[in-house]
């Protein structure tokens, strides 16, 4: 079975540009999570969806960040406009189940560099 | 605010040595998960513990959940270079909340 798929794997852009990260969760999983990982702050939850509905977006840094999940097999995380401090590795993860004991399956990540 | 502190932050050892890493909190969690992350990849689940005092073994890895469900440890016996990676702990809460609280991780390097 295919795991969580993320694209692109690497993105280099200039400050002020729009960035769109994409994620395809594992088929049949009903929850999807977007994380950001940096050395200083570790793995931070940005937002998570359950059955395509955003449940907790308290980790979204500011209005420059937005996430959508139009259907069960696709989600996007958009940053507009991007800033150098947004440079990080962004992970998407999916899970099935009903609680925090469920295994989260992570994609390989997108390494974003904003110049 | 629930926090998880992991120690040590970095650990470099020789192949064959034993080690223990810790995950501590002042908060009670209903579950504690350990993940391992290799460079360029996402974290992969190693184990989930849900009962205070629970001990689980995965080959040379031994995981323990504290009696009060506020802390956990991971012990590796006879470490091998393949154990190299970032070890992350994540706490979960009861109910339908699927949000995990993550520690910053312990970066382990096992030298041949």
Image: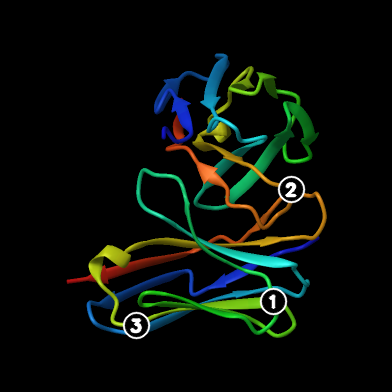
Left or right for B87, reference B31? left
> In the image, is residue A19 above or below residue A108?
above
Q: Is residue B68 visible?
A: yes
> In the image, is residue B31 above or below residue A28?
below
Q: Are marks 1 and 3 on the same chain?
A: yes
Return the residue found at the far left. B112
Residue at the location (53% across, 38% down)? Answer: A91
Residue highlighted by disc 2? A98
Residue B27 % position (x, y): 78, 71
Q: Are marks 2 and 3 on the same chain?
A: no
- Circle 2 chain: A
- Circle 1 chain: B
- Circle 3 chain: B
Mark 2 and mark 3: Cα distance apart in space: 34 Å
Question: Residue B18 occupies which quadrant of the picture?
Answer: bottom left
Report the disc number at residue B51: 1
Residue highlighted by disc 3? B77
Q: Are marks 2 and 1 on the same chain?
A: no
Mark 2 and mark 1: Cα distance apart in space: 18 Å
Mark 1 and mark 3: Cα distance apart in space: 23 Å
Helix or strand or loop: what does disc 1 sit on? Answer: loop
Residue at the location (36% across, 43% down)? Answer: B40
Q: Could you say which is closer to the camera, residue B30 or residue B20? A: B30
Report the disc number at residue A30: none
Left or right for B79, reference A112? left
> In the image, is residue A10 above or below residue B15?
above
């Amino acid at each position: 079975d295919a795991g969580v798929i993320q694209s692109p794997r690497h993105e280099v852009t200039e400050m002020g540009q729009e960035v769109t990260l994409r994620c395809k969760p594992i088929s049949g999983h009903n929850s999807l999570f977007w994380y950001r990982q940096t050395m200083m702050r570790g793995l931070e939850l940005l937002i998570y969806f359950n059955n395509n509905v955003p449940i907790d977006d308290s980790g979204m840094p500011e209005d420059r960040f937005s996430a959508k999940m139009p259907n069960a097999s696709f989600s996007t995380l958009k940053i507009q406009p991007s800033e150098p401090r947004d440079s990080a590795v962004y992970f998407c993860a999916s899970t099935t189940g009903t609680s925090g004991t469920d295994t989260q399956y992570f994609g390989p990540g997108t390494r974003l560099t904003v110049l | 605010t629930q926090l998880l502190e992991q120690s040590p932050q970095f650990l470099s050892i020789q192949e064959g040595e034993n080690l223990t890493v810790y995950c501590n909190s002042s908060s009670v969690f209903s579950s504690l998960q350990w993940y391992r992350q290799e460079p360029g990849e996402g974290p992969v689940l190693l184990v989930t513990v849900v009962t205070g005092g629970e001990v689980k073994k995965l080959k040379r890895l031994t995981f323990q959940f504290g009696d009060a469900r506020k802390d956990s440890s991971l012990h590796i016996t006879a470490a091998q270079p393949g154990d190299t990676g970032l070890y992350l702990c994540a706490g979960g809460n009861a109910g339908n909340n699927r949000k995990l609280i993550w520690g910053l991780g312990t970066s382990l390097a096992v030298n041949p």
